[in-house]
Image: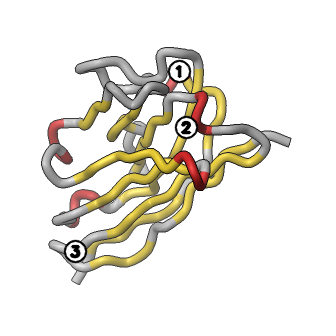
């Protein structure tokens, strides 16, 4: 059975850091571009970051540039989203996903409609 597991969310103070993990069960993430989305109740799910299969392309939405970093760990079949200098407006449920290639294109946010494997989401709450 193939599925994606996203984890690592929790409560973090403003200015703090957190690492979200995306792991693959039943398939090797190395062969897939990976995207991170986030959603707050009442709003659309938005693309936050993505990394291409070859790791030569990454994307960050403007509001997280310079604070979030996406990376791939082939040895552990994982992709991480490092959240640094978090703000209250980063509070959301974060989802890892993959889909029809190219999952990640230069300068373009990942498309929800192109994703076909989704994690169940991990909640990040930024609050003092």
In this rendering, would 90 be left or right of 122?
A: left
**Marks 1 and 2: which is nearer the front?**
2
Q: Which residue is mark 3?
A: 16
Q: Are marks 3 and 1 in contact (CB under 8 Å)?
A: no
Mark 3 nearby-residue class (10 Å; few <14, some 14–19, many ≥20) = some
Spatial distance from mark 3 to mark 2, Cα to Cα? 25 Å
- Residue at the (53%, 15%) spot, across then down: 101
Circle 3: element type: loop
Task: Point out the frontmost of discs 3 and 1.
Answer: 3
Q: Determine crowd level at label 2: few under 14, some 14-19, many 20+ residues with C-alpha closer than 10 A.
A: many
Residue in the picture at 37% in, 78% down: 11
Rendering colour mode: secondary structure
How far across and down, in percent of the image, does residue 23 sit? 61, 51
Q: Are marks 1 and 2 in contact (CB under 8 Å)?
A: no
Work out which quarter of the rendered image holds the N terminus and state it: top right
Q: State the separation of the CA atoms marked 1 and 2.
A: 11 Å
**Secondary structure of the residue carrying numbered label 1:** helix
The relative height of residue 53 versus residue 105 in the rendered view (above or below) is below
Q: Residue furthest bottom?
A: 128
Earlier sequence position, callout 3 versus callout 2 = 3
In the displayed structure, does residue 28 sit left or right of residue 48?
right
Count neighbours of disc 1 (C-alpha within 10 A) and say few if under 14, some if 14 to 19, many if 20 or more: few
Q: Where is mark 1, residue-wise?
A: 113
Q: Quadrant for residue 91, please give it.
A: bottom left
Task: Tell which residue pokes out farthest to the front in this image.
Answer: 75
Name the residue carrying label 2.
Answer: 97
Whichever of callouts 1 and 2 sits on the residue coming sooner in the sequence is 2
Report the number of discs. 3
Alpha-carbon span between mark 3 and mark 1: 32 Å
Observer-nearest of 69 and 7 = 69
Percent position (x, y) of residue 115? Answer: 57, 26
């Amino acid at each position: 059975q193939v599925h994606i597991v996203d984890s690592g969310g929790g409560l973090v103070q403003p200015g703090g850091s957190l690492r979200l993990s995306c792991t693959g069960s039943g398939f090797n993430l190395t062969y897939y571009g990976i995207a991170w989305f986030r959603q707050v109740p009442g709003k659309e799910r938005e693309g936050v970051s993505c990394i291409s299969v070859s790791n030569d392309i990454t994307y960050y939405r403007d509001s997280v540039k310079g604070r979030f970093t996406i990376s791939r760990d082939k040895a552990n079949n994982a992709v991480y989203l490092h959240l640094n200098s978090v703000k209250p407006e980063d509070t959301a449920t974060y989802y890892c996903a993959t889909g029809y290639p190219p999952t990640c294109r230069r300068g373009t946010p990942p498309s929800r409609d192109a994703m076909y494997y989704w994690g169940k989401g991990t909640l990040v709450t930024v609050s003092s």
